[in-house]
Amino acid sequence: MQKLTNKEQEIMHILWKLEKAFVKDVLAEIKTDKPHYNTLSTIIRNLEEKGYVSYNAYGKTHQYFPIVSKEEYKKGFMTTAIDNYFNSSYKNVVSFFAKEEKISVDELKEIIALIENKK
């Protein structure tokens, strides 16, 4: 999977939410820093070229839909982040969140229970 820009990620989140959308529908969902219609259309076409989006044509109008699921993208994104920032160590990820006080003891116990129940 090719890396997405922040704006491309924002557009993908909108397409995952809407499931199918015309450019005007995506534009209506953007709350801040609205791009020009033509700019948004170019971003969506870039997503198509990268293999994240496809479309149904209705004359000259296209209705876009994601062909990469949010789960697929999340898995690739997290794997890359863990490889790049935590030396491919999930222990380092959990330790980071524990040190930053972003995860509670109860949440850690839930994670341990999930791991133990998978065996």
Image: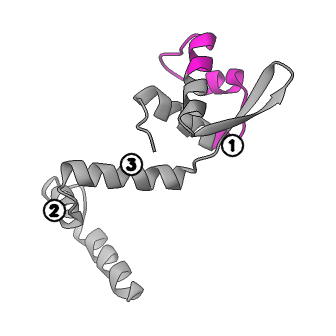
* Amino acid type of the residue tagged 1 in the rendering: Glu
Magenta stretch encompasses residue 22: yes
Separation (CA) of disc 1 from disc 2: 36 Å
19 with respect to 107 (left or right): right
| Residue 86: quadrant of the picture | bottom left
| Residue 105: quadrant of the picture | bottom left
In primary-sequence order, the first of circles 2 and 3 is 3
Separation (CA) of disc 3 from disc 1: 20 Å
Residue 114's place in the image compared with 77, above or below, is below
Residue at the disc numbered 1 = 19
Does dot 3 land on a helix, a strand or a loop? helix
Residue at the disc numbered 2 = 95
Residue at horizontal 41 percent and vertical 29 percent from the top: 5
Residue 66: x and y in percent read 63, 42
Does dot 2 land on a helix, a strand or a loop? helix
* Amino acid type of the residue tagged 3 in the rendering: Phe
* Amino acid type of the residue tagged 2 in the rendering: Ser
Residue at horizontal 29 percent and vertical 49 percent from the top: 81
| Residue 60: quadrant of the picture | top right
Magenta stretch encompasses residue 12: no
Asked if one can make out residue 30 in the rendered structure from this viewpoint, the answer is no
Q: Nearer the viewer, residue 50 or 105?
A: 50
Residue 88's place in the image compared with 4, above or below, is below
Residue at horizontal 34 percent and vertical 75 percent from the top: 110
In primary-sequence order, the first of circles 3 and 1 is 1
For residue 40, which numbered disc appears in the image? none
For residue 77, which numbered disc appears in the image? 3
Residue 108's place in the image compared with 68, above or below, is below
Does dot 1 land on a helix, a strand or a loop? loop
In the image, which is nearer the foreground, mark 2 or mark 3? Answer: 3
Start and end of the magenta stretch?
17-42
49 with respect to 3 (left or right): right
